[in-house]
Structure formats: C-alpha cells, structure tokens
Amino acid sequence: MTRHALPAGMIRAATTLGTHEGYMPGFGNDFETEALPGALPQGQNSPQKCNYGLYAEQLSGSAFTKPHPERTWCYRIRPSVKHTTRFEKIDVPLWKSAPHVLPDVISLGQYRWDPVPHSEEKLTWITGMRTATTAGDVNTQTGMAAHIYLVTESMQDEYFYSADGEVLVVPQEGRLRFCTELGVIDLEPKEIAILPRGLVYRVEVLEGPARGFVCENYGVPFMLPHRGPIGANCLANPRDFKTPVAAFEDREVPSSVVLKWCGQFHRTRIGHSPLDVVAWHGNYAPWKYDLRSYSPVGAILFDHPDPSIFTVLTAPSGLEGTANIDFVLFRERWMVAEHSFRPPWYHKNVMSELMGNIYGIYDAKPKGFVPGGMSLHNCMLPHGPDRNAFEGASNAELKAEKLDETMSFMFETRFPQHLTEWAARTAPMQDDYIDCWDSLDKKFDGTPGIK
C-alpha cells in the first residue's frame, strides 16, 4: 500500500485509538479494530478464507431486518459452536428473573435498604449476584431486573454470558475488569458499563471487595435519549462513551461457560478460552462511560423540572414516550431557581423508581439514604422529601448553591417492580423508612397567607 506524505506542517496522531489508550470513542459507532495486523478483512465481511486461519462469525443483537440493526462481525480462532457443548443445568439461587411474583412478599410500599454488607464468603460475579426486584417478563423480552453484586474473587477459567438481556453495571465500591470477547473494560465507581446480550466475558477483581448495582435489561438495548429542544449538546455526549479495542486469548486450558437463558442457568465445559476474537467490526459491542462526563441541564429561573431531564440512557418500549427502562443520574450541579422549592417535589406516577446512592447525600433524603444503599418507590405510590428536607428547602435563603459531592441514580421502568425474597427478608431493609413522612404536619388553617 502506498503511503502518501502529509501536507507540510500537519502531524498525524501517534495512535488511531483516540485520547484514551485501549478504547475507541463514540456511542453506537461502527467500529473496526484488530489485535494482529491484517486480521480484519477489508471490503467484505465473509471472505472465502480469512487471514491467520480465523473464522468469520456474526454476532447479532437485533433482528436482521431492523432499521439500523445492531451487529458485529468477529474474526476468531474458533467459531462459537466450539465454545459450548452439552449443557448441565445449575442453580444460582439468588439471581432471579421476571416474572417472579411471590404470594407472601408484599411489593406495595415505599422501601429503603442500607448497603448490603460484605462477608467472609468468597463470591464471584455469578455467585455474588443478589436480585432485589424483577419487572415484566424475560420470556417476552420486556422489563428488567435490579441486582446488587458483591464480588471478592476473580473468575478462574470460567466465563459467562446472558441470552436474556444486556447488563448495565454501576460500581459503588472496588474495581473490576471485564475481559470480553471484543476487548477489555476496567471499571471503577463513578463509571458505568454495558455488556450486550450474548457477549461472553470473564470478571476479574482489580481492587476488592467490590459492590455495585446492576440493571438487567430484557428489552431493546439502551440508547441515548432524544434531546428535543435541548438540542445537540449536554446530557451524555456520544464522544464520552468508550468501546474497547480488540484483545484475545489463545489458551488451551479446561474452562467452563455459564449461560443464563430464560431465567435459568446452565454450564458447559470446554478445553480452551472462548475469548478468541482477534479482530472485529460493527456496532454491537460493550462500552463504558464516566458519569463525571454527564453535563446536567436544569431550571435557571424558577421551578424544578421533571427528573427525566437527568436521563443518561433510555431503553424504549412499544409505547411512545414511555420507557422500558430509563437510567437517570443525579450528580453535582448548581441550584439557582428563584422563589421555588428546589428538591424533587412530592409526586406519584406510572413509573417504578429504584434508586441507588453511589456517594454523598441526596438532597431529598438528607438522612438514611446512604452510599451503597437503595430505595424503591413503586408505580402510583406517593413519595417525596422527608420533613427535614421539606422544611430546609422551604425556609432556605434562595441564593445560588452548589449541590456538591453527590451522585445517585435511578432505574425507572414502566412495569411494577416485585421484591424478591432476598430483598424482603435478607437484605438490610430499613423498617422505619415509611415513618420518615410521619412528622410532616398540617399547615392549612383556612386563613390566607404563607405558613
């Protein structure tokens, strides 16, 4: 191939990987990457023979005929049919899937939990998953499940993939490495990652113990929300999403692959690592995103916008404007609204809200909602600030104020979220949470004026 000289004074970047070593920037891009030179075919997807003796294989995340389908072409040492053999059913007792409605568990209520404590038990990504709520139906590919993960040990010659949905990972403590078929993602608190449905990966502990939250999305993949009148910028900008470059293993060692399919778990045993994709191109791939890159927008004169203004990602449903799941972020920001109640107001709505605290103090609940903790306000159940938050915001001097050192999030879905037995009886639920509104007093006395 002839290389042409650059124009005088122009300098070519030393790497084609962008400004983050090991990652390619952009959301939903059509990427191409190779771990060995010449491993990626050019001009076609499936040549008669691939370089290095590789196999061409397509990984499809959507129907072939979907407008703008999600798919990636992989060039691998062995085709995926060599990464599974006969399956044996296994039990992963605390990882549940919808529908999971228990007759003796009450999900109707406002609930809050303290952080799930670590124990002396050795736990991997699979054995350390604890399902808190389920919603919808995994078999019809609607809804979601919310989990807490507790991980102390790296997976050793063990791999996992889910046929049920993509996984949104929100770390709160510790650092993990996701070694996937399509590259390596290192993840720490204040970052999130998406692992697509059908992607094989192994999870290693870089710094433990690790704890965090997981949203398992049974529906269509997460996408960036339509900004509408906001326009092209702010919220989560596409350039801040990072997809890993190709990386592969060529290891002949007894290994096992665990598959989650329709809510059930199965194991298959093979004689090699399945992470053998030497090159790939496409738009169906894992990625990570630094939540500190999120640029919030809000009211700059009066009133408090709907929390949808803080949407990072959305997974649409078949009902226009109503999400299967929204991932919403409440991070540091300036509060400047005049003659307005600045925290979230009292409300009840059709969406079910599971919140988690990554760090700091959430403005609507100054006490009790602590880092690592979570809360659930199910659909059509009223909620809002406790008395301290209400009185403080109602009587504060309304000067410009920085809401600082805070980061909480919400998994919001159109479906009711049903508690698992673990969430209802084992997880550290705050039994007195419902009492936080008891001290709200009646101010109305029939006479006009501000009370």
Image: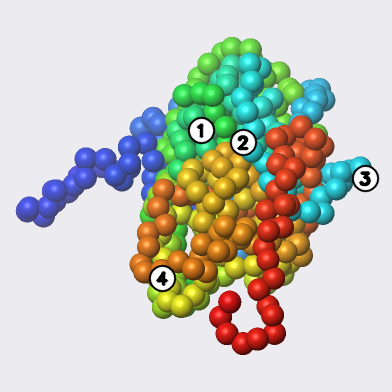
Quadrant in the rendering for residue 94: top right
Please name the residue that numbered disc 2 is placed on. 115
* Residue located farthest toward the right when viewing the structure as drawn: 103
Pointer 4 with pointer 1, Cβ within 8 A: no
Q: Is residue 18 visible?
A: yes
Q: Nearer the viewer, residue 176 or 448?
A: 448
Total numbered circles: 4
Q: Is residue 407 left or right of residue 315?
A: left
Please name the residue that numbered disc 1 is placed on. 173
Quadrant in the rendering for residue 95: top right
In this rendering, the label closer to the viewer, 4 or 1 = 4
Q: Earlier in the sequence, mark 2 or mark 3?
A: 3
Residue at 64 percent across and 20 percent down: it is 119
Where disc 2 sits, the SS reads loop
Q: Earlier in the sequence, mark 3 or mark 4?
A: 3
Where disc 3 sits, the SS reads loop
Q: Nearer the viewer, residue 317 or 325?
A: 325
The amino acid marked with disc number 3 is: Pro
The CA distance from mark 3 to mark 1 is 34 Å
Please name the residue that numbered disc 3 is placed on. 103
Please name the residue that numbered disc 4 is placed on. 398
In this rendering, the label closer to the viewer, 2 or 3 = 2
In this rendering, the label closer to the viewer, 2 or 1 = 2
The CA distance from mark 3 to mark 4 is 48 Å
Q: Earlier in the sequence, mark 2 or mark 4?
A: 2
